[in-house]
Amino acid sequence: MKALLALEDGRTFPCRSFTGPGEAWGEAVFNTSMTGYQEILTDPSYSGQMVTMTYPLIGNYGVNSEDVESARIQASALLVKEYQKFPSNFRSTSSLADYLKDQGILGIEDLDTRALTRHLRNAGAMRGYISTEDLDIESLVVKARNIPSMTGQDLVRVVTTDKPYFWGAGKPVFDDPKLACLDKNIWNNKGGKYSVVAFDFGIKYNILRCLENAGCEVVVVPATTSADIVKSMNPDGVFLSNGPGDPEPVKYAIDTIRALVGHFPIFGICLGNQLLGLALGGKTFKLKFGHRGGNQPVKNLTTGKVEITSQNHGFAVETDSMSGKEIEVTHINLNDNTFEGFRHLNYPVFAVQYHPEASPGPHDAGYLFENFTKMMKT
């Protein structure tokens, strides 16, 4: 089925839908991972975005119920060069097309993904609109320009959980009666496991798996949870998750984090890193086309080692804005020298911009979860 992608700057790309008729819109971005399209689709950090896969053949291993990073698809559309409609993998339970159609997500193929990626690298990530119904160029460009900008949007409220839950045996648990009251009595294994309050700004399931594997009992709370409630829960540590969009409008979380610094060990990932930076008085900015993929080189300035990391973010902390804030920069991106991680010099607080839990991607940075438990222990 014929379709057309129009970007806000007037550039258009003819393509076809492999999921039937429909329309989709959002910020057009690209991901350089060769595998992991199901994890990417279900990552809440992609809320409000249409994801272009730079690897040309997508769908060849199908989908399954295990490789998900949230309860549903979060991206607004998937753009690929060539869709493989006959998957072959022993874990596959469905085709990618059926998976997308079941959740009302548009899948696009026969798109010149190389040309689109080069354009986004040169001009920057931008708003786009895809349709199988309206193929008029001028009309679609106008629609693209009317989409709200990613800058200034609080997308955390869109993806955060409505109510707290435990993470246990690899899945969320909402029906534990202790969740009715968020206080110090909520923990089932206090003293046996590290008790962790995890803020859901768009948290990925594999982060929770990694915390569980590191010996943590985790309670996930909504992004709007107050500092007073967290203090009443008296955890061993606080985790700040990844999430979508611009960190600056998420002022309620910034205020909460500021009130928690110095009270508990804190570990932040991705958006959690940015919110923590803002809470400590830093500034953030929008990257030209973001870091999205499983091959981003990051230098650990503490050890001198280079880690190949999984990343997905369009905003970053301004390095200069963190000077004089009693922090030490611990990681930098070797592609563009942007801020990738820090630790506080006086409090048990650290954060990284990338994804140590991967899914998809390499596991070079998995040690950070152990660093968190060591921090809680001491």
Image: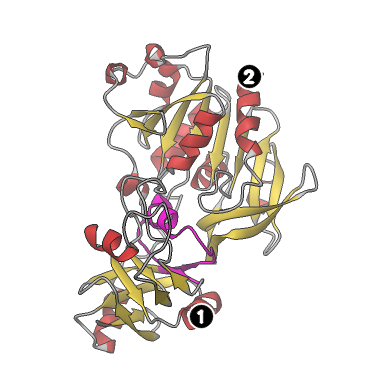
Query: Residue 337 got which mark?
Result: none
The image quadrant that residue 3 belongs to is bottom left
Check disc 1 and report the residue beneath it. Answer: 114
Residue 118, compared with residue 52, is above or below; it is below
Packing grade of label 2 (10 A; few <14, some 14-19, many >=20) is: few
Assess whether residue 245 is covered by the magenta stretch: no
* Residue at image point 50% right, 29% down: 212
Q: Amino acid at mark 1?
A: Arg
Report the magenta residues as a range: 28-54
- Which residue corresponds to the image point at 22% horizontal and 73% vertical from the top-left? 20
| Residues at discs 2 and 1 in contact (Cβ within 8 Å) | no
State which mark lies toward you, 2 or 1.
1
Amino acid on which the number 2 mark rests in the picture: Lys
Q: Nearer the viewer, residue 190 or 92?
A: 92
Q: Using residue 297 as the reference point, say whether residue 199 is left or right of it.
A: left
x, y percentage for residue 335? 68, 64
Q: Position of residue 258 (x, y in %)?
A: 51, 33
Residue density around tag 1, few if under 14, some if 14–19, many if 20 or more, within 10 Å: some
Q: Which residue is mark 2?
A: 377
The mark nearer the N terminus, 2 or 1, is: 1
- The vertical placement of 145 against 69, above or below, is below
**Where does the image place residue 165, in percent across and percent down from the top left?**
34, 29
